[in-house]
Image (spheres, helix red, strand yellow):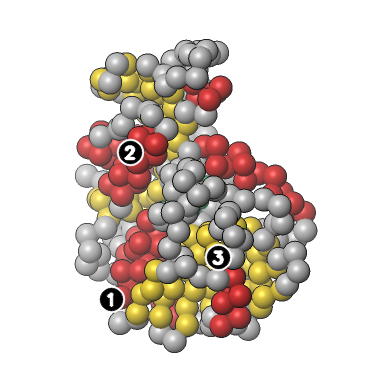
């Protein structure tokens, strides 16, 4: 495949095939690889009308030793099951989830960016209610699809700091709502504030807690992390997505002897941090310099990347590319 591996960005690209499974009355079928990137779906499918739709995001990496590593797929399986329960969809067992990913990555091996290009194969599992209902009820049929897409950087420029905006008048997730799960509707709700932020020159937006607008929740597509006095600080909140990247970085920080704090973070605390960053599968670790709200501008650090953040980034990506020992057994090797 003739792709400019070093300049992929984060956009849709066709690959050979996706994999698709169907569950009827609670029983998953054997699944099949499908070449055409289309789905024949009932016009009354619950995914279309009532938002029974969940997705996941993870990556496969071509390592320095030529092997392909999939980063913590069983964690995404677990999270998708939590989302399925909250949206009353059929759960995908972890074994099926991981085996589907391995099959579709193998079938698209030539779409995995070569080692050294900084790219990876983004894996997008999708679970939808595909059966018809006209009353608001859960579907009796579900489709589980995994598609893959070679990607590079989500925000241009690797570890270059970006500025973020808290867009007034928009919340991401209500208390007791669905912010802690990965339902498609959360992202529909994010499109307008994300566009407002982009048009004002901010590639990323930050959400505060919906109840008081006092505490930091997370960014639109990533978790919030802060560094100060050899401490890694990240918000604890019922309405943020439990990020697998954040979970891994917390472990790495501990391995380096840093203190890890998970606690509510007031927006005004921003002034006291040495460094802040966004973390997630797509954004990896993206430093954030300024945060602009309706009435304040917070400037964190001097706009450079601290050696501690660099070390966290180098370690997680080093493990993913097989350059650093995977001491916690996070990577699933492709046979
Ligand atoms: N928060 C939101 C809202 C996200 O969409 C994502 C991306 O999946 C994350 C956080 C980061 O999660 P992870 O590190 O598991 O990709
Ligand atoms: C991810 O990081 O996998 C995400 O889901 C973020 C975004 C591309 C939706």
Rounded to the nearest whole Å, what is the CA distance between mark 2 and mark 1?
29 Å
Sequence order check: which comes first, mark 2 or mark 3?
Answer: 2
Label 3 element class: loop
Q: Could you say which disc has been placed on residue 215 in the image?
A: 3
Front in this rendered view, residue 226 or 124: 226
Label 2 element class: helix
Looking at the picture, how far across and down is residue 45, in whole percent?
50, 17
Q: In which quarter of the image is residue 312?
A: bottom left
- Residue that sits furthest to the front in the current view: 212
The residue tagged 1 is 255
Mark closer to the observer (1, 3) = 3
Q: Relative to 246, does residue 282 appear above or below in the rendering?
A: above
Q: Residue at x 44, y 48 (%)?
A: 180
Sequence order check: which comes first, mark 1 or mark 3?
Answer: 3
Q: Which residue is drawn at 43% across and 44% down?
A: 181
Residue 70 seen anywhere in this rendered image of the structure? yes
Q: Is the residue indicated by label 1 positioned so its CB lies within 8 Å of ligand 1?
A: no
Looking at the picture, how far across and down is residue 51, in whole percent?
52, 29
Q: Residue at x 49, y 74 (%)?
A: 226
Rounded to the nearest whole Å, what is the CA distance between mark 2 and mark 3?
28 Å
Label 1 element class: helix
Q: Is the residue indicated by label 2 positioned so its CB lies within 8 Å of ligand 1?
A: no
Left or right, 138 with reference to 171: left
The residue tagged 2 is 81
Looking at the picture, how far across and down is residue 210, in whole percent?
58, 54
Residue 113 seen anywhere in this rendered image of the structure? no
Q: Is the residue indicated by label 3 positioned so its CB lies within 8 Å of ligand 1?
A: no
């Amino acid at each position: 495949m003739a792709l400019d591996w070093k300049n992929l960005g984060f956009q849709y690209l066709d690959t050979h095939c996706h994999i698709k499974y169907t569950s009827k009355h609670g029983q998953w079928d054997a699944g099949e690889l499908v070449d055409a990137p289309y789905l024949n779906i009932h016009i009354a499918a619950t995914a279309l009308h009532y938002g029974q739709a969940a997705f996941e995001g993870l990556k496969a990496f071509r390592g320095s030793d030529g092997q392909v590593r999939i980063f913590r797929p069983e964690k995404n399986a677990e999270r998708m099951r939590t989302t399925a329960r909250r949206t009353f969809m059929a759960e995908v067992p972890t074994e099926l989830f991981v085996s589907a990913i391995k099959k579709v990555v193998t079938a698209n091996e030539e779409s995995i960016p070569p080692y050294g290009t900084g790219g990876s194969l983004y894996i997008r599992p999708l679970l939808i209610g595909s059966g018809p209902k006209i009353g608001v009820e859960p579907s009796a049929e579900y489709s589980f699809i995994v598609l893959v897409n070679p990607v590079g950087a989500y925000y241009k420029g690797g570890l270059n700091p970006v500025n973020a905006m808290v867009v007034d008048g928009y919340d991401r997730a209500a208390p007791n709502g669905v912010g802690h799960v990965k339902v498609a509707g959360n992202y529909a709700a994010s499109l307008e504030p994300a566009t407002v932020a982009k048009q004002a020159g901010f590639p990323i937006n930050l959400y505060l807690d919906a109840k008081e607008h006092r505490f930091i929740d997370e960014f639109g597509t990533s978790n919030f992390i802060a560094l100060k006095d050899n401490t890694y600080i990240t918000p604890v909140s019922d309405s943020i997505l439990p990020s697998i990247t954040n979970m891994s970085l917390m472990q790495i920080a501990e391995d380096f002897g840093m203190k890890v704090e998970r606690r509510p973070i007031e927006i005004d605390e921003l002034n006291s941090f040495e460094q802040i960053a966004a973390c997630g599968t797509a954004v990896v670790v993206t430093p954030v310099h300024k945060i602009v709200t309706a009435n304040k501008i917070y400037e964190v650090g001097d706009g450079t990347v601290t050696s501690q953040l660099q070390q966290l980034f180098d370690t997680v990506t080093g493990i993913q590319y097989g350059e650093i020992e995977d001491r916690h057994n996070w990577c699933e090797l492709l046979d």
